[in-house]
Image: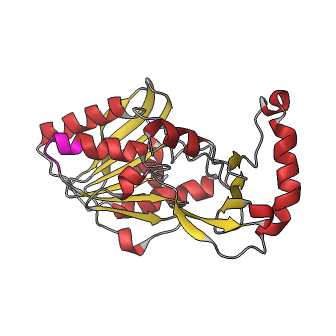
Amino acid sequence: MSKRYEARFFGSLKTANATFKRTEAGRMAAVDAQVVRRLAASGSRITELLDLGISSGTTTIELINALRQAGQLPRVTGTDRLIHANLVSLPWGCRALVEPGGHVLQYDVFGAPIRPWRRRLDYVTGMAALGNATNRLLGPHVTHAPAGTPVALVSPHLARMKNVTLIEDDVTRLNPGLIGRFDLIRAANLLNRHYFSAEEMAKAVANVRTYLRGPGAWLLVVRTHNAADHHGTLSRVAANGELEVVERYGAGSEVEDLFTASERSA
């Protein structure tokens, strides 16, 4: 699968929580380079990396490659709410790519991909009528379809990389298997107030903190609006266990204060 085809395929998948699986290549390159330089300057060795909310995994590959070029060879755990879906058979030789919960990501109608969701342009091109008809005809059959074939919703290039483990995970639910393991955690375009309620965000922040190995471990929380507009915070666990800001990108992370001691004790 070419990178161009990957981008088109993942960009068409709208998940049940209204997010897309697309991740533009090179989107995090500038921040990756700055983080790698900071790690090198501090003499830190990263043996375990956790990348949260990897989407298609494109930027995970790029971060791994940036670290490897700097001589860092960590074991990598990548998480996302949705890593696998099922390709199920439907009447008339059609198929559907379906989340475990039953949400349709894409229809395959005689070899042609049909989105179950609409763009404004679809009402101009006529695709809206075709999509609506597909939903009406095939949607009711999805619930009763056989289990189907599992399909990985990440880049095949990432799935083939050595020392990489991919798991489905909800950052708002504590994962005991991740506690205290990681020298570097990245949460890119995940921990922002648009996705989570205040209560969910508090749980996510608390969970992420427990996944850090301890003093000397690094946390990068960043949000990108386009390839050149990054707002994030790189922090490090101090000897007393608190996170201290080391570097900010743009205006810093919008949830930086939630990770600080002053905010948590307020």
Q: Is residue 140 above or below residue 256?
A: below
Q: Which residues are magenta?
A: 67-72
Residues 12 and 37: in front is: 12
In this orientation, does residue 54 appear?
yes
Residues 30 and 113: in front is: 113
Residue at image point 42% right, 44% down: 58
Provide residue 215's location: percent of width, then percent of height. Answer: 22, 57
Residue that protrudes farthest toward the top in the picture: 228
Residue at image point 50% right, 65% down: 169
Q: Is residue 129 above or below residue 45?
A: above
Residue at image point 75% right, 35% down: 119
Q: Is residue 100 above or below residue 249?
A: below
In screen coordinates, is 262 left or right of 13? left
Residue at image point 70% right, 67% down: 89
Check if residue 71 falls in the magenta segment: yes
Instruction: Determine the image quadrant of residue 27.
Output: top left
Instruction: Determine the image quadrant of residue 247.
Output: top left
Provide residue 88's location: percent of width, then percent of height. Answer: 67, 67
In screen coordinates, is 196 left or right of 58? right
Check if residue 148 falls in the magenta segment: no
In this orientation, does residue 235 appear?
no
State how many labels appear. Answer: 0
Provide residue 260's location: percent of width, then percent of height. Answer: 40, 48
Q: Is residue 111 above or below residue 81?
A: above
In screen coordinates, is 238 left or right of 41? right
Residues 230 and 17: in front is: 17
Provide residue 203's location: percent of width, then percent of height. Answer: 53, 61
Residue that protrudes farthest toward the left in the picture: 43
* Colour theme: secondary structure
